Image: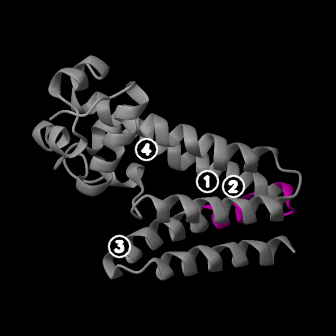
Amino acid sequence: MPRTVLDRDDAVRALAGVFRRRGFESGSLSVIQQETGIGRGSLYHFFPDGKADMARAVLAQVRGWFDEQVFEPLRTAGDAGEAVARMTQVVEEYFVSRDRVCLFAAMTLGEEQETFAREVRAYFADWVGVLTETLHRGGISGPDAADLAVDAVAAIQGGLIMTRALDDDAVFTGIVARTGRRLHAVLS
């Protein structure tokens, strides 16, 4: 029996779980209906352009969370060290609580990667960019700040892959903690 969906945001949250578990390509409309409990009519009401529209809505919701919880605090923090500490804490909590999957990274897999390329590039470029700015404000030279930011984001993303492969959250929490300590060391 289809579940009652109050609004589009409810549907987006349910869809995020399907895309985290199955990815975009394996999340057929039948699977989406079954796993979310949302009927076909409701899905097309909220997402008239189909599955790609659903995925874009999920990415927009995730992006909104990162804008609010990660990017904006990095952008506006007066103390770079505190900003980095907050970033590592909220990023760790976010990914551990969401099945250790980065939906933006997941959308780069498979034949549909070009469908979401613009959103994925913007997400990673913005994360690296705002972290670079924060490190620069903390006294790190421009090129070094950019290298450290790329390495930090890459370590976090790689940590997600390792954590899923080993089925051990401690791997991710350790990688995030070490990444934070490395950034703090150069800011001190």
* Figure check: 111 above or below 154: above
Residue 142 placement: quadrant: bottom right
Q: Which residue is rendered at x = 18% and y = 29% of the image? A: 39
Q: Which label belongs to residue 164?
A: 3
Image location (x, y in percent) of residue 93: 57, 63
- Looking at marks 4 and 2 on the same chain, the residue that comes earlier in the sequence is marked by 4
Element type at marker 3?
A: helix
Inspect the image, locate mark 2, and give the three-letter code of the amino acid beneath it: Leu
Residue linked to disc 1: 128
The image quadrant where one finds the N terminus is: top left
Contact between marks 3 and 1 (CB within 8 A): the answer is no
Residue linked to disc 2: 131
**Label 1: how many Cα within 10 Å (few below 14, some 14–19, many 20+):** many
Stretch of the chain drawn in magenta: 137-150
Contact between marks 4 and 3 (CB within 8 A): the answer is no
- Looking at marks 4 and 3 on the same chain, the residue that comes earlier in the sequence is marked by 4
- Marks 4/1: CA distance? 12 Å
Inspect the image, locate mark 3, and give the three-letter code of the amino acid beneath it: Arg
The image quadrant where one finds the C terminus is: bottom right
Q: Which label belongs to residue 120?
A: 4
- Marks counted in the figure total 4
